[in-house]
Amino acid sequence: MRNFFTILILLFSLNFAASQTDAEVLKTIFDASLTNGKSYEWLDHLSNRIGGRLSGSLNAERAVEYTRKELDSLGLDKVWLQPVMVPKWVRGTSEFAFIETEPGETLSVNICALGGSIATYVEGLKAEVVEVSGIEDLKTRDRSEVEGKIVFYNRPMDPTLINTFSAYGGCVDQRYAGAMEAGKLGAAAVLVRSMSHKIDDLPHTGSMSYGDLPNSERIPSAAISTRHADLLSSLLKLNPKIKFYFKQNCRNLKDVQSYNVIGEITGSEYPNEIITVGGHLDSWDLGDGAHDDGAGCVQSMDVLRLMKNSGIRPKRTIRVVLFMNEENGLRGARKYADVAKQKGENHIFALESDSGGFTPRGFSFDCSESNFNQILSWKPLFKPYLIHYFERGGSGADVGPLKGDNNVLAGLRPDTQRYFDHHHAASDTFDAVNKRELELGAATMTALVFLVDKYGINPIQTNQQFKD
Amino acid sequence: MRNFFTILILLFSLNFAASQTDAEVLKTIFDASLTNGKSYEWLDHLSNRIGGRLSGSLNAERAVEYTRKELDSLGLDKVWLQPVMVPKWVRGTSEFAFIETEPGETLSVNICALGGSIATYVEGLKAEVVEVSGIEDLKTRDRSEVEGKIVFYNRPMDPTLINTFSAYGGCVDQRYAGAMEAGKLGAAAVLVRSMSHKIDDLPHTGSMSYGDLPNSERIPSAAISTRHADLLSSLLKLNPKIKFYFKQNCRNLKDVQSYNVIGEITGSEYPNEIITVGGHLDSWDLGDGAHDDGAGCVQSMDVLRLMKNSGIRPKRTIRVVLFMNEENGLRGARKYADVAKQKGENHIFALESDSGGFTPRGFSFDCSESNFNQILSWKPLFKPYLIHYFERGGSGADVGPLKGDNNVLAGLRPDTQRYFDHHHAASDTFDAVNKRELELGAATMTALVFLVDKYGINPIQTNQQFKD
């Protein structure tokens, strides 16, 4: 008898969704997210009960277990873990650094090791400093200017770029490849200005690489807070002979087993057409990874839950993927795409949220012009929610490997102004996320997934398979 | 010789501005605000060195002096204070409140007196509580249900409204008129749920009015934090006989002298056509008034400074007005409009920023359709700055009295999601304002003012005067 009523209610709700206009369904989705969303509660747990979850750490494994358990509770058709080997880098004990203006006269400064860096000697490292405005500037220097010194990359993010990700893109090369380039010239170490518009005391970590540099040329690499970068720069102008000391004992360990966490609602009509929505479950270790990318994970999880709760039964397969190891390897994303390719899966659409949990403004799309025009026809439906940004451009690092000849990759585009105040720093914490902003993002993603499911992507060639 | 060079530089910069396309001028304005804006520094002083500045307080006078001095330093054509008499309400010592579940068993709760309220008795006030969902609900109650009790207005802001100002508008009547209506039914006092989406411990103050209720029916009125409103409501469901105690010793004093702070760049061609840009200088006393409306004041001040620094010499008169007493009287706005009318000033355009210092999204306009269409033709110029919202609707409380037959009133519309977390509460502080978001707002306002100055409003009838 109880089952009978359950079926009745289910049929009613399905019928309700089917009879609604698209505008009405979107209203149902937004109302559900803003009154009965689960993203914020999930993020609270992920941030405050688990915390930072660097690939290979026990916290990352706790995050895998927690999100799998939560997905299990949603009554999806399938939930599983996809094994993937990930790099393991550990920060070790806190870094320590000072500027020595005269022998015995020191100013403490805040630094953090960059992810992937080697340690300094146990006793630390002290050397003169040569400031450069970036890798291009470094390449104009003679080896004699650099050898044995600490190269200080101090190019700031360009404040005139409205999209702060563009400003980030304009100087992240010094963080990623700065040690590699300085190592080739015999530098002792590198210090990199933190990637933030804000002048404060927080160092911002992030990935760096030595490429295939021989061990003998690999040098320690650390980020310095913006305030202390400005301090160091001004002191160097007064006296180019001042020295910088720092000590860090981070290490690269052996790869360890980890997982992508995946759940799906199998499509009722076209189960082989897969729509993926996701974020990355790993985070840096300094904060609790609330914006980067706990927000994207919980929003993606709520997409499936909100669809179910809004009475939407998808025709196509909707999959949430919480990718492991975006920050320092992208192994989870590559594994997911490799498996999809092996299985001949048809990924028609993949959406990532990895730009913070701020007020959503729209999406960027990596797709053909005709696919873009199809999506653009839905833009008016989003106007009541102040979602206005539909542009071609990048999507997301984790969905990138799913790129096919004729599918659509997309990235949620929230407001970016505050993002880099928190990105990869101790200030990336739950309290910096606003509940409504997070929920609006989840609703915006769900709305787009609903439309893609309803109308398909490029339905003429709907059977085209995923290609590398 | 020095003057000669100054003139050369001035001529060059004027020529430079004149030869630029509108898109280039907007880029110059945004670049200047983001690299060399002054709004954030001014707001730091106004918030952290002065603080909350309720009308009639010494802090309000300090804010008048400070902003006049800063405007004086900008080399405007005129800076002056416009006298206005303002109401003076004082909070007195901290309020104190508890729920008494049994005699002697109490739970402390956070309240604050509403602006304009009378005090309780010196020994406080204790009574049973009757919860209502708003004024309409109250009006369905019999006098016997309400008499001698504390009426507890607990209608929350509607979370499904995307624009949080709409949700605020949907329940602020219980704060403003709640005591007036409950007083008519013989209630002992009123408690009002704080106007905030966030569930936290902060009470949010705001203005209330007794209208022309006789003194005998005027009752104390206080706001209760959202968390404690939920607590009280759930306890009342368990036991409708629980009592509430509170004590407050706020007072309404005699009106005192205060000022609007005004500065202008006199127009070079049409000095009689006035473009006004402003915010309100007074604030509530619980926080430091950074978002409401320190942000609007410093952005408005920077409009004139950014125009000068960008080499724009306006044809029309650009006036910054820092209005006094928006929060609990609107006396400054009325005085400014009265004087404008007496002088026969032609206010063609008035823009207010009073919705917080968050990322700007656009403007709303109170104007004719033809004037709106003229402004709408400029919208594409704003696209690079992600300014997309150009709609007809309200403008701002302070510019409202300038409404004429054929002029344009406008309000800056920033992102609203976080605003009511801070509005009128102890959390309206400088640290809740993001520097870039504030500066983008100042630039967006300057860009619109530049275009209004360049093209005029409804140029066919350009000599039409301001009308009541």
Image (cartoon, coloured by chain):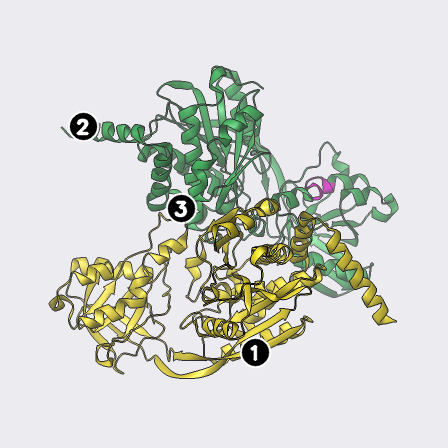
Chain colours: A yellow, B green
User: Looking at numbered disc 3 in the image, what kind of residue is underneath it?
Assistant: Tyr
| Front one among A410 and B238 | A410
Query: Picture coordinates of residue B5 (x, y %)?
Result: 17, 30
Which of the two residues, A300 or A429, is positioned nearer the viewer here? A300
Position of A74 with respect to A160 (left or right) is right
- The residue positioned 87% from the left and 44% from the top of the image is B142
Q: Are marks 1 and 3 in contact (CB under 8 Å)?
A: no
Circle 3 sits on which residue?
A: B40
Real-space CA distance between mark 1 and mark 3, rounded to the nearest whole angstrom: 48 Å
Q: x, y percentage for residue B420?
A: 59, 49
Q: Are marks 3 and 2 on the same chain?
A: yes
Task: Provide the secondary structure element on which disc 1 rests.
Answer: strand
Label 1 – label 2 distance at C-alpha: 75 Å
**Above or below for B287 versus A430:** above
The reply to whether residue B465 is visible in this rendering is yes
Magenta-highlighted residues: B173-179
Q: Residues within 10 Å of mark 2 (few under 14, many from 20)?
A: few
Q: Amino acid at mark 2?
A: Asn
The residue at which mark 2 appears reads as: B3
- Residue B63 visible? The answer is no
Drawn side of residue B154 relative to residue A198, left or right: right
Residue B35 picture location, percent across and down: 33, 46
Both marks 1 and 3 on one chain: no
Q: Is residue B316 above or below residue A132?
A: above
